[in-house]
Amino acid sequence: MLRAPAGGSGAAPYIRKARRAGLRPAAGRRYSSFRMETPQDRGRGQAAGRRWKDRPSPLAGRRALVVGGSGGIGAALAAALAARGADLLIHGGSSRERLAAAVARAEEAGRDALGSEASGGASGSASDRAQGRIPARPSVESLLLPLERPADLVDRLPGLGRVDILAVAFGPFVRKALHETGAAEWERLALLDLALPGALASALIPAMAARGYGRILFFGGTRTDAIRAYSSNAAYAAAKTGLAVLAKSIAAEYSQAGIGAFVLCPGFVDTEYLGEGQRAELRSKAPGGRLIEAEEIAEFAASLVAAEPCIASGAVVALDGGLKL
């Protein structure tokens, strides 16, 4: 062991001498002490380098169903998942044009993430591609299906193929005082904002558990990460707040089967669904007068889904920048 002064210009001669002698810093000590680098050290370093170089996209081989993926946060999330290698089934509820645009966006994200290797370019040998070290370009499929009740989509699941990742970025919003909210509105909000995500999870969990992997991502509403009072959208908020019970129940019951679940509650997000008047109103209330970009929410969500191990399962996360109303 060669010891040197701890930093400062006086350490420089020792550092140069140590480097010439083939010494390296002791773990956690920077250049205050050195030991001889062994062949085992070099082997570990080379192996780590190979693992990093050959590491596939984090979601390569996984397939995600993004409900409400034709616009807003859902479309941004689909692109973020594709950029991490996931195959996609993107659901849209009403607009064929928006759905086609979301598919094209996700396909482009998948191509950009893989670069020339995904296109069979000069980078990467045929052997690398054949052995899966260079992942295939993600496949992107679409489903245009209006939803009025959970069974509209749940009954279609058997014919839609494998689903490893479920993301529900869909749900109607009603802004009315309690005494103005009718029975039909209560029923629609409860069915599509709470029962639909729950029914999809119930239907998909058995196959996820059998494969030993599953990720379920729900999107709550602004400030529905906790039980609060609401003066203008209590019915919507009641349904969205219930998603926390779902996610925490899934996390508690199925973590041993490799299934994780989360709820993200975005703040004021700038999407194509907002008019200029709405944007101005929300900016006046948003922290710093800034609306959140859909891509910011999507990147956080995709990173959460891709993380291994899934230590955040059961988390209910407010992504509102410290919103105070």
Image (cartoon, rainbow, N blue to C red):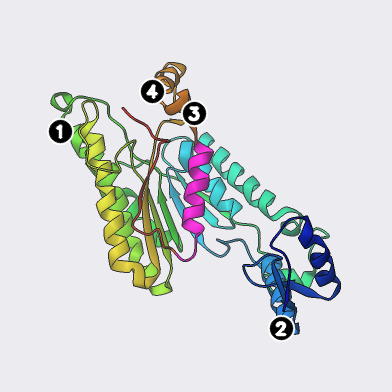
Mark identifier at residue 285? 4
Q: Residue furthest top?
A: 277
Question: Which residue is label 2 attached to?
Answer: 40
Q: What amino acid is found at the position of numbered circle 4 in the picture?
A: Lys
Residue 310: x %, y % from top left = 43, 63
Question: Which residue is label 3 attached to?
Answer: 272
Q: CA distance from mark 4 to mark 2?
A: 58 Å
Give the quadrant of the C terminus.
top left
Q: Pick whichever of labels 3 and 2 is earlier in the sequence.
A: 2
Q: Pick whichever of labels 3 and 1 is earlier in the sequence.
A: 1
State the residue at coordinates (37%, 41%). Answer: 146
Of labels 1 and 2, the one closer to you: 2
State the residue at coordinates (75%, 78%). Answer: 37
Question: Which residue is label 1 attached to?
Answer: 183
Q: CA distance from mark 3 to mark 2?
A: 56 Å
Q: Residue furthest left?
A: 179
Write the start and end of the magenta stretch as one range.
294-309
Tell me where residue 236 sits by quadrant. top left
Q: What amino acid is found at the position of numbered circle 2 in the picture?
A: Gln
Label 3: element kind? loop
**CB atoms of marks 1 and 2 within 8 Å:** no
Of labels 1 and 4, the one closer to you: 4
Position of residue 66 in the picture relative to residue 174 (left or right): right
Q: Pick whichever of labels 1 and 2 is earlier in the sequence.
A: 2
Label 2: element kind? helix
Q: CA distance from mark 3 to mark 1?
A: 29 Å
Of labels 4 and 3, the one closer to you: 4
